[in-house]
Image (cartoon, rainbow, N blue to C red):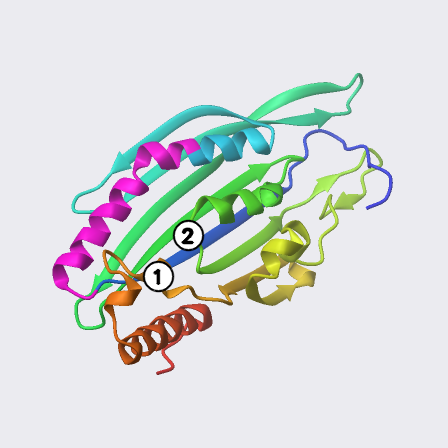
């Protein structure tokens, strides 16, 4: 964007990030599947999710105004943070104001199907900010906070703000892809696809883990307890599940 543009009034641009991860696991019995769901439910309860979102809020330079959290029966959790961020107002002398218009939410969705022996845990995080701050800088933190086998991300900048001379500004930071804000070492671990609509300031990126260490996907089972053919069958099942989730459609 070159030299920073002085704005008239508040920065009214709304930046919305939708961040979704999927964690896939193999649990061979109905009991193991239920135990896995209980484990995930405890591992990612509302208290821990609140900590993750609070750290995210600190990273983008915002202030938490209010927290609402809830654990559900039989499983799942939700957390919502109302946040405020600093926005520059270059009318007369420069001031800093807090806009109580932004929020961060997280919802978890553990699920399994008894016939497939697969359990898939989904986390949805949405960050909406108004003003200068953007949640893109937190992507590496979010990816590292969860066991992220598949990741889908949507980022959109909506509305416009005005410079002091009245010129409309529809984007206030450089972006060609969400990948620009993810560390290269992270990207190298995933197959990555972009679908971007630049005219609409709409960016979509999805990622799928390249390498699978089977032991990491077995719940309460040691890999050496399984014969080679069973290991191969499980690997194929996991990979098919991941490809379908990554593709967003039934393939097999």
Circle 2 — which element? loop
Q: According to the image, label 2 marks what residue?
A: 147
Number of numbered markers: 2
Q: According to the image, label 1 marks what residue?
A: 215
Q: Residues within 10 Å of mark 1 (few under 14, many from 20)?
A: some
Task: Give the residue at the far bottom of this rendering.
Answer: 252
The residue shown at (16%, 47%) is: 74
The answer to whether 234 is drawn above or below residue 198 in the figure is: below
Horizontal and vertical percent position of residue 115: 18, 72
Q: Residues within 10 Å of mark 2 (few under 14, many from 20)?
A: some
- For the stretch drawn in magenta, what is the main secondary structure? helix
Residue 96: quarter of image: top right
44 and 94: which is toward the camera: 44
57 on left or right of 37: right
The answer to whether 250 is drawn above or below residue 7 in the figure is: below
Instruction: Write down the region rendered in magenta.
Output: 28-51
246 on left or right of 122: right
The answer to whether 229 is drawn above or below residue 123 in the figure is: below
Residue 117: quarter of image: bottom left
Horizontal and vertical percent position of residue 187: 61, 59
The residue shown at (34%, 30%) is: 68
Residue 173: quarter of image: top right
Horizontal and vertical percent position of residue 45: 29, 38
Circle 1 — which element? helix
242 and 96: which is toward the camera: 242
């Amino acid at each position: 964007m070159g030299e920073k543009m002085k704005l008239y009034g508040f920065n009214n641009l709304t930046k919305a990030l939708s961040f979704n991860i999927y964690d896939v696991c193999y649990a061979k019995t109905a009991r193991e599947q239920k135990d896995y769901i209980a484990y995930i439910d405890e591992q990612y309860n509302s208290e821990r999710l609140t900590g993750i979102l609070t750290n995210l809020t600190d990273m983008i330079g915002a202030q938490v105004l209010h927290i609402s959290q809830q654990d559900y029966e039989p499983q799942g959790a939700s957390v919502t943070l109302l946040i405020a961020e600093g926005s520059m107002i270059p009318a007369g002398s420069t001031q800093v104001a807090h806009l109580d218009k932004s929020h961060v939410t997280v919802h978890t969705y553990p699920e399994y199907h008894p016939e497939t022996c697969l359990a898939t845990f989904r986390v949805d995080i949405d960050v909406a900010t108004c003003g200068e701050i953007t949640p893109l800088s937190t992507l590496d933190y979010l990816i590292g906070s969860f066991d992220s086998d598949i990741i889908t991300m949507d980022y959109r900048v909506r509305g416009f703000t005005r410079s002091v001379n009245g010129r409309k500004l529809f984007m206030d930071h450089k972006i060609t892809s969400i990948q620009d804000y993810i560390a290269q070492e992270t990207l190298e671990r995933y197959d990555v696809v972009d679908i971007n609509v630049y005219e609409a300031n709409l960016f979509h990126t999805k990622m799928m883990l390249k390498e699978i260490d089977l032991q990491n996907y077995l719940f309460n089972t040691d890999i050496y307890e399984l014969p080679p053919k069973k290991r191969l069958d499980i690997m194929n099942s996991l990979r098919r599940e991941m490809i379908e989730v990554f593709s967003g459609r039934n393939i097999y």
